[in-house]
Amino acid sequence: MSESIKEQLGFESKIEIPQNFRNLFEALDFSTKYGIFDVPLQKRGDGIQARHIPHILDFIADQDSKHHIWAYEEPENSLEMSNAFNLAEQFEQKFSKENQIFLTTHSPAFYDLSSEKVSRWLVTSGQYKDTDHLTSNAIPVSVEEDNPDDRLGIAELVKERAKEIYLSHDALEKNVLRLEGEINTYTKPVVVTEGKYDVTIIKKAWEKLYPDEDMLFDITSCSAGVTDEDEQAGAKQLQTYLDSILHSESKVRIGVFDNDKAGIVCFQRLRRYKNVNALTKKHDAGKSHALLLPKPPSDELYWPTSDICIEFLFKKEYLTEGYIKRVYYGADGKEASEQQAKILDDEIDPEKLESLRSLFKQEYKIRSNRKKHFAETKVNNYPPEAFEMFAVLFDNIRAAIQS
């Protein structure tokens, strides 16, 4: 049972023998992990206590030959929305295997379940015929035809967005576990980047700049994306991973953010990290660091952009036009529409052109469908002097390791 709770809730919770042996068979004391501390279950919040209940019931049913029927009232009580969706998934996929479960709910996390294991009924109150007596009415709800949301009010407005947030949060947590499992196999300090092509380019940069020196660190990407489009959430994934690191961790971990809008926001939102300088933060009680990519000089040798990903550390002569595209941003930070960009690019419609030039600033971005070719093919042929901005990045990484 303790293993089941640890797997589903994400922390260790073990059964302990009560100090008062007269009550041994009257109570179970749970000791739960909170960081490095053991905290009695009775001292945890109502939500965590409530989430132990179905695991205990399921364990009891598993040890018994009798068929068990649960009557569960509003299991979502005391749970934040993401945990309610997680618990609903457990009820459907785990607890209902060996148990018949009847439950009442007001949460879209539960009433939106729609597998063949689930029957849904809308229960309403009303008067019995023409009398003053109150009665309850149970109406079967068909997934295809009926929707109880008009009776449940605001739930319809938040249902889809809440589920979207839960799935996103769940994916981030699973990626953290995957990444930490990989990092635990490394022996050197570990650098973690946003995207997988960053890893390829950084390895090549070290090889070119320091051919006779072993790399000081192991390196991996926090991105779990399979396609290039999946890499867009790399900054958020890296922030989530760095925030998950405990102060007791002894291994040096260094996250490297792109110096773009998303990277800067996630860098600034890191919890428990204090500024060392404009490009570096350090965990306030551990050995972890966060870095922003350095900015190249503002001269004509580099492409002008405020969104610096790793490719923009190369000069124009190496990062050629086939790998970039022009984009236009207004003062509010919004990108120009496709039609506006076409006028600015092709310099058509002179009357609108001058007006648009005053409203939008031209910058450059990397073509996402060309990142793979640039990292795995183009970079291999560059001379050491092409990687001069990477020497700045490596100096910052060295400083983080040595601190």
Image (cartoon, grey):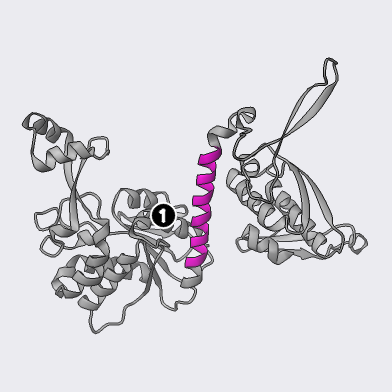
Determine whether 390 is above or below 279 in the image: below
Question: Is 101 within the magenta?
Answer: no
Residue 272: percent from left, percent from top: 47, 54
Residues in magenta?
A: 159-179
Q: Is residue 173 left or right of residue 206?
A: right
Amino acid type of the residue that numbered disc 1 sits on in the rendered structure: Lys
Q: Nearer the viewer, residue 87 or 28?
A: 87
* Residue positioned 79% across, 29% down in the render: 136
* Residue positioned 41% across, 77% down in the render: 188
Question: Is 167 within the magenta?
Answer: yes
Q: Is residue 187 left or right of residue 86?
A: left
Q: Indicate the quadrant where residue 401 lies.
A: bottom left
Q: Which residue is mark 1?
A: 274
Would you say the magenta stretch is mainly helix, strand or loop?
Answer: helix
Q: Nearer the viewer, residue 136 or 84?
A: 136
Which part of the image, by quadrant, shows the N terminus?
A: bottom right
Residue 273: percent from left, percent from top: 43, 55
* Residue positioned 67% across, 52% down in the render: 92
The answer to whether one can see residue 245 in this image is no
